[in-house]
Amino acid sequence: MRRYPSRYVSSFSFGPGPVSSAIKALIIANVAVFFAQFFPILTRLWGLQPYLVVRGWIWQPATYMFLHGGLFHILFNMLALWMFGTELERTWGTRYFLKFYFVTGIGAGLLTVAFSLLPFDFARQIYATNVIGASGAIYGLLLAYGLYFPDRPIYMYLLFPVPAKIFVLIMGLIAFYSSVVGASGVANATHLGGLLVGYLYLKGRRIDPLAELKYRYLKWKINRVRKKFDVYSGGRADDWDRRVH
């Protein structure tokens, strides 16, 4: 629940606000494909099956993201996409947001294939599994949200609030443990892959030294007048501690 300053509007709202453009397009695409799964062949062709990927079905690490295993599966994934993705899209812009979403989703799929090739029983059981769902990309967004808004409260299991950074750590540990013990039918290796790819992508962005120097100077000038004019400091996609309008 968010409260806006009285000089703008005196009201309360739940969630991150209206659905942004990229989020809306992704939700529409996922829902459309979900109904198209009425034809089982689509799940067979588009689901991520590592043993087929290594045999040449190279589109599956991208298409599996749009398939879901049931109503609650797609409902919770789309809810998380809206809750965590909307503010990130506003921060990054639509183009960068979509790039991050697909890099983490596809990267998580590729890591799932690599994980299934490891010479361990808990890894080999994934080799012939059909992995579906947007969770790899969703976990990438969750990681980014935790880095950008580390102290933002998130209700764990809708019961008690924890800081976003702690929430991400807990979900990562759960995904790692579940991937090793193989205790459920959920592709936890894909969840863990989304977290890992998201972190490496955000950490690995190359920065032009001259552009960085110019940016830091402009940010310093803005911060000097922040108190006087009540201005929030701006930033780029790699400023995890920035405050956003």
Image (tube, rainbow, N blue to C red):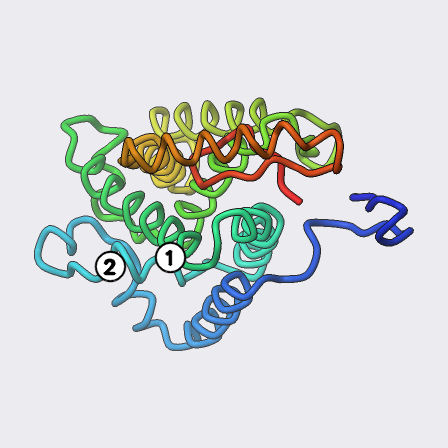
Give the residue at the far left of this rendering: 55
Please state the horizontal and vertical placement of residue 130, each as a whole percent of the image: 30, 53
Dot 2 lies on which element?
Answer: helix
Check the image and report above or below for 23 versus 33. above
Please state the horizontal and vertical placement of residue 15, each as a whole percent of the image: 72, 49
Q: Which mark is residue 65?
A: 1
Q: Earlier in the sequence, mark 1 or mark 2?
A: 2
Please state the horizontal and vertical placement of residue 70, each as a whole percent of the image: 52, 60
Check the image and report above or below for 160 versus 133. above
| x 82%, y 46%: residue | 4
| Relative depth, front residue between 200 and 35 | 200
Please state the horizontal and vertical placement of residue 98, each as a whole percent of the image: 41, 57
| Relative depth, front residue between 168 and 116 | 168
| Relative depth, front residue between 44 and 6 | 6
Q: Amino acid at mark 2?
A: Gln
Q: Which mark is residue 46?
A: none
User: Based on the displayed image, in which of its 4 quarters is residue 212 positioned?
Assistant: top left
Dot 1 lies on which element?
Answer: helix
Check the image and report above or below for 44 versus 49. below
Q: How many marks?
A: 2
| x 81%, y 52%: residue | 13
Which residue matches tag 2? Answer: 60
User: Based on the displayed image, in which of its 4 quarters is residue 155 positioned?
Assistant: top right
| x 51%, y 71%: residue | 28
Q: Amino acid at mark 1?
A: Met
Left or right of 175 on screen, residue 52:
left
